[in-house]
Amino acid sequence: IPEHWEVRRIKTVTKILRGKFSHRPRNDASLYDGEFPFIQTGDVARAGKFIFEYKQTLNKKGFAVSKQFPKGTLTMTIAANIGDVAILDFDACFPDSIVGFVPNKDVFLDFLYYSFTAMKKELLKGAPVNTQGNLNIERIGVMSIALPDHQTQKALVKTIESASDKNNQAISRAQREIELIHEYRTRLISDVVTGKVDVRGIAVPEVAEEEILALDEDAAETDNVINEEGAMDEAN
């Protein structure tokens, strides 16, 4: 950790908010299908940086036994999939399997999000997966976070998000290519089984082992280039 950074306990730089859903049994149908979003651990796990979607809602009866948290609250799962984090993009309720964090003036929300993301392995290490609530909240609160000044926090967030954008673009291109291959395969099968393509005189070419090895080498070279670019970004 750089000398000019502070090391602070999480509870000293954030307000920790416990989720709530006190009714038992939890699956009481009379509490659901209303106007209030009710976030679950799976919603946090599926989200990227922000939670834009939800699958469950509470009605007024359910809302009365829960608690609403404001847009911009950083959420963390403390049961089931422990350590997943995401920021609410809307006001929402959530149960005690999720904890909310509101940073104070010493830490930016985006920086806190990336810090918690980096801490996931530490959270999982020795985490009591069969319990939740006070024990986990207390454990999180006394964990340490490295905290630079505001300007450095902003610069680090900008660097991370710039690198993430490049990675996301590469992933999107690869996913699109895979989709096109699947579309071509589906269309080809359809054309063949419906007789649109006469395959009786078509010989399937054999792929030489050298060609397969060449493809593997190309893939390895691409990985090396990506790794080198990532190392250069970190050095800068």
Image (cartoon, rainbow, N blue to C red):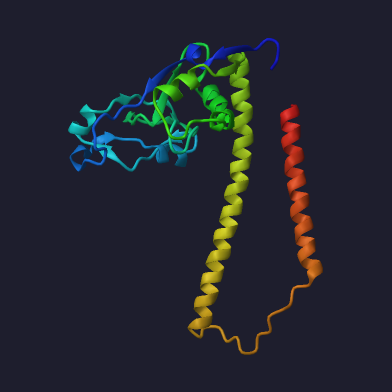
| Most foreground residue, 121 or 35 | 121
Quarter of the image holding residue 236?
A: top right
Residue 96: x %, y % from top left = 35, 29
Q: Does residue 73 appear in this view?
A: no
Which residue appears farthest toward the right when viewing the image? 210
Q: Vertical placement of 170 versus 34: above or below?
A: below
Q: Vertical placement of 29 versus 82: above or below?
A: below
Residue 208: x %, y % from top left = 78, 72
| Most foreground residue, 24 or 57 | 24
Residue at image location 51% in from the left, 71% down from the top: 186
Q: Does residue 101 appear in this view?
A: yes
Residue at image location 41% in from the left, 26% down from the top: 99
Residue 212: x %, y % from top left = 76, 65
Say how many tags the image has. Answer: 0
Quarter of the image holding residue 68?
A: top left
Left/right of residue 31 with respect to residue 104 in the rendered view: left
| Most foreground residue, 216 or 160 | 216
| Most foreground residue, 26 or 191 | 26
Residue at image location 42% in from the left, 31% down from the top: 131
Residue 136: x %, y % from top left = 45, 25
Question: Dividing the image into 4 quarters, which one contains the N terminus?
Answer: top right
Residue at image location 56% in from the left, 62% down from the top: 180
Q: Vertical placement of 202 versus 153: above or below?
A: below
